[in-house]
Every structure is written in structure tokens, then in C-alpha cells.
Image (tube, helix red, strand yellow):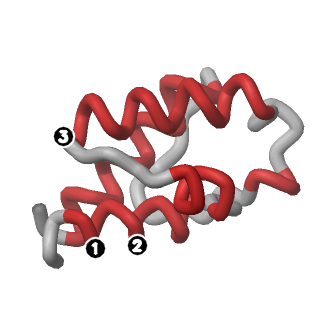
């Protein structure tokens, strides 16, 4: 997976979980988005794992603060 593909995947997953459109490459921070609560965080992790065919560690899950963190993690797992 290339970075633009990963950014698109992340924005699609965020859009689905947060229930609003988010453009690829748009920075979304958990602390700044009131709808990104702990339940949505878990939903997002499961959706990303399913769609990207990866698994996150507990440390990775708790360390996700924003969309850039997610792009970086997914890219690392795909060797990009």
C-alpha cells in the first residue's frame, strides 16, 4: 500500500466511524474531536484492522492520537 492509498483508507474509516466526511490527508486529532470517544476509537481500530489486513498491538492502539499516527502505523505495517 502506498501513502496516498493509506491516507484514503484512513479518511474513509474515520468518515465511517465519526459519521462525517473527512477528506484524505486531513488531520483529525482525537483530543479535538468530541465524537472520537473511546468507543469510536475501538470501532476505528477494528475497522482499520479489517480493511487493511493488519493487527495493532495494545501499545499502538493506546498511542493513536490523530489521523497522522494511524497513517504512519499502517504504512509501517505495509512496509511503505
Say whether marks 2 and 3 touch (CB < 8 Å): no
Residue beneath label 3, please?
Answer: 53
Residue 9 on image: x %, y %: 30, 46
> First in sequence: mark 2 or mark 3?
3
- Vertical placement of residue 28 versus 20, above or below: below
Residue picked out by circle 2: 72
Q: Secondary structure at mark 1?
A: helix
Residue 14 left/right relative to 62: left
Asked where in the image residue 41 lies, by quadrant, the reply is top right
Tell me the element at label 3: loop
Between marks 2 and 3, how big is the CA–CA gap? 15 Å
Q: Are marks 1 and 2 in contact (CB under 8 Å)?
A: yes
Task: Note whether 25 is above or below 44 in the view shown.
Answer: below
Q: Residue 30's spot in the image, x, y percent?
A: 76, 52
**20 relative position to 12: left or right:** right
Residue 33 at x, y percent in the picture: 82, 45
Residue at image coords 53%, 68%:
69
CA separation in Å, label 1 and label 3: 13 Å
Give the residue drawn at x 39%, y 66%: 73
Mark 2 or 3: in front is 3
Is 15 placed left or right of 78 in the picture? Answer: right
Question: Looking at the picture, does residue 37 appear above or below residue 62?
Answer: above
Label 3 environment density (alpha carbons within 10 Å; few <14, some 14–19, many ≥20): few
* Quadrant where the C terminus is found in the figure: bottom left
Front position in the image: 33 or 52? 52
Marker disc for residue 76 = 1
Callout 1 crowding tier (Cα within 10 Å): few <14, some 14–19, many ≥20: few
* Secondary structure category for the residue under label 2: helix
| Image quadrant in which you'd find residue 47 | top left
Q: Report how far apart the C-alphas of labels 1 and 2 lie in the structure.
A: 6 Å
Quadrant position of the N terminus in the picture:
bottom left
Label located before the other in sequence (1 or 3): 3
Amino acid at each position: 500500500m502506498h501513502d496516498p492509498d493509506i491516507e484514503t483508507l484512513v479518511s474513509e474509516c474515520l468518515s465511517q466511524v465519526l459519521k462525517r466526511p473527512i477528506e484524505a490527508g486531513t488531520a483529525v486529532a482525537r483530543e479535538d474531536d468530541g465524537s472520537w470517544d473511546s468507543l469510536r476509537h475501538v470501532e476505528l481500530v477494528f475497522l482499520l484492522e479489517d480493511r487493511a489486513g493488519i493487527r495493532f498491538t495494545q501499545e499502538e492502539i493506546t498511542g493513536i492520537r490523530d489521523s497522522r499516527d494511524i497513517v504512519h502505523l499502517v504504512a509501517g505495517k505495509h512496509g511503505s
